[in-house]
Amino acid sequence: MSRHTRVHYMDNLRAFAMLLGIFFHAALAYSPLLGDIWLTADPQQSKVVDLLAYFSHIFRMPLFFIIAGFFAAMMVQKRGIGGLIKNRLLRIGLPFALFFPLIIISFMVVIGWAIEHVQQPSPMLGFAKMMSQSPDAPAPPLTTTHLWFLYNLMFFYALAVIAVKWIKLDWMKTLSAFPFVFVLLAPLMLIPALSTQYSPTPAPEQFMPQLWSFGFYGLFFTLGWGLFSRPDFLDKLNPYSTIMLISGTFAYGVFYSLLPTEVNFQDVMIQASQTPELNAKQLLLAGLQAYAGLHVSLGLLLLGRRFFNRQSSAMRLIADSSYWIYIIHLPVLWAIQFLLLDTQWGLITEFLISSLGTLLIGMLSYLLIVRWTPIGWLLNGRKGRQNNEDAIEVKEPSTSLD
C-alpha cells in the first residue's frame, strides 16, 4: 500500500528562499556598495545592510537550485522524462513567457513615473532621466530581469533530460561514501565558474546563456538531483551541519571584508565588457564564496529538515503564494521605494514599509486574483490534486522482519 505526501521542509525552504529575495532587493536601496547604480538607491545607507544583504545573497539562490534539482529528480521518478518536460514547460516555461513581457511593461511604467515625479532621484534615476531626454540615447539592454532563475532552470532541465538518457553513472554513490571529503573539497568545484566573475557575483540576467552560471548554479541543481537519489546522504552530512554553518559564515565574513566599498557606473560598464584578472585575490574571493555558498546552503537545508519538516495551513499558503509574490515583487517594491525617496523617514522605517508593503500587496493579490483562478492553477496546479509535483510516493513500512 502506498500514499502520497509532500516533502514539507523542501516546500518551506523554497518559499523562504523566494521571499527572502524581497528583503534582499529592498535592502539594496540602502547599500553603500550599490548606491551609485541601483535605481531606488536612498541617501540613507548602512554597511550593516550590505553585510546582511550579501550574506543572504551567498546562499539564497544556491539553496533554491538545490531544491529545484531535488524536485526535478522526483518528477522523473513519478512521471518519467516526458512528465518532467511537460510539467516544467507548464510550470516554468509558460509563466516566464507570459509574465516576462508584463514585468517589462511594469518596469517601464514605474520608472517612467519616477522620472517625471520623484523630486530627489537617486544617482541612477537621475541618469535615466537625462538619457530619456536625449533622442539619440541607446535603449537599455533587454534582460531576463529577476526572472532569470526561470530562464536558467529551463536550460538545467534540458541538460538533466540529456543526462538521464545518456549518463548511467551513479556518482552520488561515491559522494555518499565520503561525506567529510565532500564537505572539505566539494566547494572547490565551484571555483572555476566564480573566478570568471567580479564580486559580488551578478545575476546571470542576459538572454545569451551565461556559462559560468551553469558551473555554479547548475552544480547546485545537480547536487539537489543527487540528494533525491541518495536521501541517506543528508543523514551522513547531518553531523557536519554546525561545522558547515560556522565555516560558511566565517568564509563569508572574510569575503565581505575583501569586497570593494562601492561600485560606480563606470565599474559596471567595465565589468560587463571584460572578465576579471585571474590573480591570487580573485581566486581567494571565488574560493571564499564557494565555501560560504555551499556550506551555508547545506547547513540551512539540514536545519530545515530538522525543524520545518511539518505541514500547516499557514505554511502551505506561504509556500504556494511565494512563486506569484516573487514574480511580481520587484516592480511593486520599486514603486514603493521611488515614493519613499521624497520622504524624510528613517532607514529602518523605509525598509520595513517597502519590504513588508511589497509582501502584503503580493499576498493580497494572490488571495484575491490568483489562488483560485487559472493563474494559480498555472503556477501551483489545481488545489486538491493528490499527484502534484511536490508529492512523492512513500511505501508504508513493512510489518515483517525482512
Image (cartoon, rainbow, N blue to C red):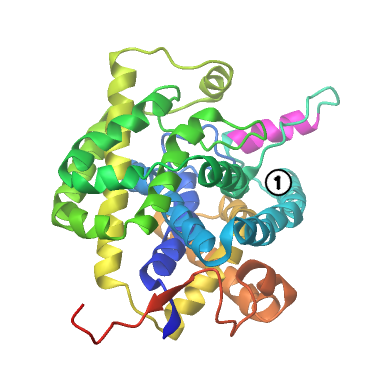
Magenta part of the chain:
124-133
Query: What is the quadrant of residue 88 in the picture?
Result: bottom right
Residue 175 image point, x, y percent: 26, 44
384, above or below 298, in the image: below
In the orientation shown, which residue stands out farthest toward the right? 135
Relative placement, left or right, of 239 versus 217 is: left
214, above or below 118, in the image: above
> 81 or 340, which is in the foreground?
81
Q: Where, quadrant-wise, is the C terminus in this rendering?
A: bottom left
Q: Residue at x 43, y 57 (%)?
A: 70
Query: What is the quadrant of residue 92 in the picture?
Result: bottom right
Q: Magenta stretch: dominant SS?
A: helix
Residue 295 is inside the magenta segment: no
Q: So how many labels did they put on this image?
A: 1
342, above or below 196, in the image: below
Residue 261 image point, x, y percent: 36, 28
Relative placement, left or right, of 99 versus 83 is: right
Label 1: few (<14), some or many (≥20) within 10 Å?
Answer: many
Q: Which residue is mark 1?
A: 111
